[in-house]
Image (spheres, helix red, strand yellow):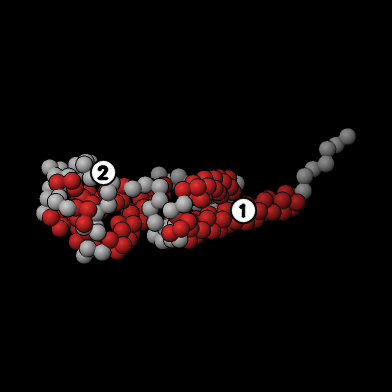
């Protein structure tokens, strides 16, 4: 018996259907992650929710699990698409959306940015070297609304260029803690975008596949 030959048209249709399903899965994962980030922005802006340890712990666990699932689904969908499927605008568009939404989310999983503001304001307002003086060395530092009670006994842990940047951002913030925090987060977003651009440029130079 002679085996029946496969139909190229049917194979192309099946492949096109698989690609369409993968594109849809990628968009669903992206919108799912964006929805979770929006929920985080709303949750941590509500004082009685953010300050409730039980509710905050449960929400963080659900948020982490949801973000991980959305990322893995999007990554799997992206791997199923060919390199020339034209998904770069989709990936970049979601990355920009995630970054902008992250600007609206208060720091809830790390206090590091508050330590950066502490050291920057220490230089700008009090003229102190963060490598030789700590926040505790500032008299009545608790009365300064720009300081937060984190690592006040520690000296600066990063290089002088970073400390200069922290001082510059605090100077631009003009003593407004919320505005200064936004400037730090916006700077981080710009650095993140530059890192992505460098990665894409390197992939192009090395002729590596990119979405």
State the SS at label 2: loop
Residue nearest the observer in this picture, 201 or 50: 50
Dot label at residue 122: none
Residue 96: where, in percent of width, then height? 44, 60
In which quadrant is the N terminus drawn? top right
In-image side of 203 versus 131 (left or right): right
Q: Which residue is mark 2?
A: 151
Can residue 171 be seen from the camera position used here? yes
- Residue 134 vertical position relative to residue 181 in the rendered view, above or below: above
Q: Are marks 1 and 2 in contact (CB under 8 Å)?
A: no
Residue 160 on image: x %, y %? 17, 46
Query: What residue does disc 1 label?
Result: 25
Query: Is 153 or 140 nearer to us in this picture?
Result: 140
* Mark closest to the chain's N terminus, 1 or 2: 1
In the visual, does 166 lie left or right of 190?
left
Q: At 21% across and 65% down in the image, what residue appears?
A: 174
**x and y percent of residue 102 in the render?**
42, 57
Which of the pair 32/108 is nearer the observer? 108
Kindly report the distance in space between the C-alpha atoms of the residues bearing marks 1 and 2: 44 Å
């Amino acid at each position: 018996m002679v085996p029946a030959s496969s139909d190229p048209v049917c194979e192309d249709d099946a492949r096109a259907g698989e690609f369409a399903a993968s594109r849809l899965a990628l968009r669903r994962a992206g919108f799912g992650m964006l929805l979770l980030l929006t929920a985080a922005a709303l949750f941590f802006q509500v004082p009685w929710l953010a300050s409730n340890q039980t509710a905050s712990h449960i929400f963080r666990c659900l948020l982490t699990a949801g973000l991980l699932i959305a990322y893995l689904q999007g990554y799997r969908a992206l791997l199923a698409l060919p390199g020339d499927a034209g998904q770069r605008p989709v990936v970049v568009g979601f990355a920009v959306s995630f970054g902008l939404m992250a600007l609206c989310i208060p720091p809830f999983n790390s206090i590091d940015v508050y330590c950066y503001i502490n050291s920057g304001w220490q230089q700008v307002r009090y003229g102190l070297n963060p490598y030789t003086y700590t926040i505790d060395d500032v008299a009545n530092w608790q009365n300064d609304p720009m300081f937060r009670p984190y690592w006040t006994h520690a000296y600066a842990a990063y290089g002088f260029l970073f400390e200069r940047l922290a001082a510059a951002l605090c100077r631009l913030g003009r003593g407004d803690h919320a505005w200064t925090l936004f400037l730090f987060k916006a700077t981080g977003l710009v650095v993140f975008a530059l890192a992505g651009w460098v990665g894409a440029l390197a992939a192009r130079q090395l002729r590596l596949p990119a979405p």
